[in-house]
Image (cartoon, coloured by chain):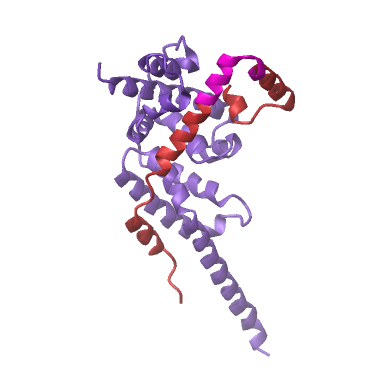
């Protein structure tokens, strides 16, 4: 399932995977769960933005204009 | 005229200065995205901040080695991951890989069991807090974590991750698979521990 979700299967393989998902309710549920989890993880980490202070310090690293 | 020997140099210097400014602006514009990855490659905010400053200082110093038009974000992350390695991160023993009989279904089944049969996917995931995710990530052994963070948080392709970490693409895939399983297992443990009996 992971290669399918990561979109790295060949067209033929993806076709097989999708055909299976059409027929198998359990796998469909698992797929939806994995997707939801993936989105959740991404949102969880996005919720902690870069500290403003750090951004300022990084700008200070810029080459001063002559 | 003697002017002609000086003019090209002046023009060159001006061009280079302009390129350098543009490079630094583009690099800084990516800092939020780079931070998002950095934050979860290391254990704490403080480490992430130190690492970011070191990375950008080095990036600005070696700006000429960046090929314009190529993936600047990946280039920055490469510097960052190399610095992280140089800093001599804690050696973590790779835990014994007990076979997960339920395989990738481990988290799903555990959460489902705790939910007393309520198998609505969104509700199941809601049992996890954001802190669960962040702390679970920090517990994944670093070799696996590097790949999970780059692919799942940094949204890099397998190929980019392979280049950033300087490992074969097959290794990216196997570490990604293992890392995700460990992550889900850790989150499952946390989610269930959080349940009041």
Can residue B128 be seen here? The reply is yes
Residue at point 34%, 31% (across, down): B132
Q: Residue furthest right?
A: A12
Q: Is residue A25 magenta?
A: yes
Q: How many marks?
A: 0
In the rendered image of the structure, the colour used to display chain A is red
Give whichever of B67, B31 is nearer the camera. B31
Position in image of residue A31 (x %, y %): 55, 23
Q: Residue furthest top?
A: B101
Q: Which chain is purple?
A: B
Q: Residue furthest left?
A: B196
Residue B195's image quarter? top left
Give whichever of B140, B116 is nearer the camera. B116
Position in image of residue A35 (x %, y %): 53, 29
Q: Seen in the image, is B69 located left or right of residue B143?
A: right
Can residue B83 be seen here? The reply is no
Residue A13's image quarter? top right
Q: Is residue B50 above or below residue B61?
A: above
Q: Is residue B67 above or below residue A10?
A: below
Q: Is residue B143 magenta?
A: no
Position in image of residue B134 (x %, y %): 36, 35
Give whichever of A45, A55 is nearer the camera. A45
- Segment colored magenta: A21-33
Q: Seen in the image, is B83 located left or right of residue B158?
A: left
Position in image of residue B81 (x %, y %): 45, 42
Give whichever of B84, B108 is nearer the camera. B108
Q: Main secondary structure of the magenta part?
A: helix
Q: Quadrant of the C terminus of chain B?
A: top left
Residue at point 36%, 61% (across, down): A56
């Amino acid at each position: 399932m992971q290669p399918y979700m990561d979109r790295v299967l060949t067209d033929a393989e993806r076709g097989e995977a999708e055909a299976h998902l059409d027929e198998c309710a359990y796998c469909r549920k698992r797929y939806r769960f994995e997707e939801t989890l993936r989105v959740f993880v991404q949102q969880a980490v996005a919720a902690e933005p870069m500290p403003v202070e750090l951004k300022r310090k990084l700008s200070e690293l810029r080459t001063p204009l002559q | 005229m003697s002017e002609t020997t000086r003019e090209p140099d002046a023009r060159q210097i001006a061009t280079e200065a302009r390129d350098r400014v543009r490079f630094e602006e583009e690099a800084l514009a990516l800092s939020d995205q780079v931070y998002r990855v950095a934050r979860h490659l290391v254990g704490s905010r403080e480490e992430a901040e130190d690492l970011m400053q070191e990375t950008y200082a080095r990036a600005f110093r070696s700006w000429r080695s960046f090929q314009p038009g190529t993936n600047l974000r990946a280039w920055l992350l490469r510097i960052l991951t190399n610095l992280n390695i140089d800093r001599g991160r804690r050696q973590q023993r790779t835990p014994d890989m007990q076979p997960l009989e339920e395989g990738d279904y481990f988290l799903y089944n555990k959460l489902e069991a705790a939910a007393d049969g309520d198998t609505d996917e969104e509700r199941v995931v809601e049992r996890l807090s954001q802190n669960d995710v962040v702390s679970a990530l920090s517990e994944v052994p670093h070799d696996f974590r590097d790949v999970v963070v780059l692919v799942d948080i940094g949204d890099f392709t397998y190929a980019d991750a392979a280049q950033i970490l300087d490992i074969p693409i097959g290794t990216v895939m196997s570490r990604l698979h293992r890392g995700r399983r460990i992550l889900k297992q850790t989150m499952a443990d946390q989610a269930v521990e959080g349940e009041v009996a």
